[in-house]
Amino acid sequence: MSDIAIISVLEEKIDELISYIIRLEEERKGLLNQIHEKDARISDLEGKLNTLENERAEVGRRVEHILEKLGRISSEGQEVEGQGGNFIDSETGSPEGDFQFADTD
């Protein structure tokens, strides 16, 4: 092989290598863009997750508060019954005390 033929083969290999490097650089740019898009998406989802966690905690607090209210109502009702505050006489099945029903029929 002559020196010119060797240089031509070498030049061809260098051109192929340059083309390959250019393709790799373009692929790298595309991948970096995908990474930036994914990072933005992750940030957005983390914000939404944080919002949902805060809402869930608030719902939990509110449900707990409602249950406490219901517990107070239930315990107050038991205290009234324990103090003889029943409206029905257990022996006769009729209302106790001064409480009377009006017959509207």
Image (spheres, grey):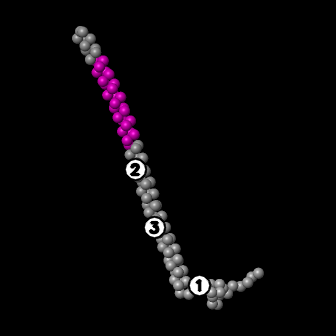
Determine which residue is flagged by label 3.
61
Q: CA distance from mark 1 to mark 2?
A: 60 Å
Give the secondary structure at mark 1: loop
State yes or no: residue 32 in magenta: yes
Q: Position of residue 101 (x, y in %)?
A: 69, 85
Query: In terms of image quadrants, where is residue 7?
Result: top left
Q: CA distance from mark 3 to mark 1?
A: 34 Å
Q: Position of residue 87 (x, y in %)?
A: 61, 84
**Marks 3 and 1, the one that precedes in the sequence:** 3
Q: Position of residue 33 (x, y in %)?
A: 38, 39
The answer to whether marks 2 and 3 mark residues whose Cβ atoms lie closer than 8 Å is no
Q: Nearer the viewer, residue 15 or 104?
A: 104
The residue that appears at 28% across and 14% down in the rendered structure is: 8
- Looking at the rendered structure, the secondary structure element under dot 2 is helix
- How far is disc 2 from disc 3 in space, using C-alphas? 27 Å
Q: Nearer the viewer, mark 2 or mark 3?
A: 3
State the mark number for residue 86.
1
Q: What amino acid is found at the position of numbered circle 2 in the picture? A: Ser
Label 2 sits on residue: 43
Give the dominant element type of the magenta stretch: helix, strand or loop: helix
Using the image, determine if residue 41 lies above or below residue 89.
above
Q: Are marks 3 and 1 in contact (CB under 8 Å)?
A: no
Q: How many marks?
A: 3
Quarter the N terminus occupies: top left
Please give the name of the residue rendered at 46% of the width and 61% of the height, measured from the top-left corner.
55
Vertical arrangement, residue 21 with respect to residue 62, above or below: above
Badge 3: residue crowd in 10 Å (few <14, some 14–19, many ≥20): few
Secondary structure, mark 3, is: helix
Image quadrant holding the C terminus, namely bottom right
Of circles 3 and 1, the one toward us is 1
Q: Amino acid at mark 1?
A: Asn
Q: Which residues are magenta?
A: 11-36
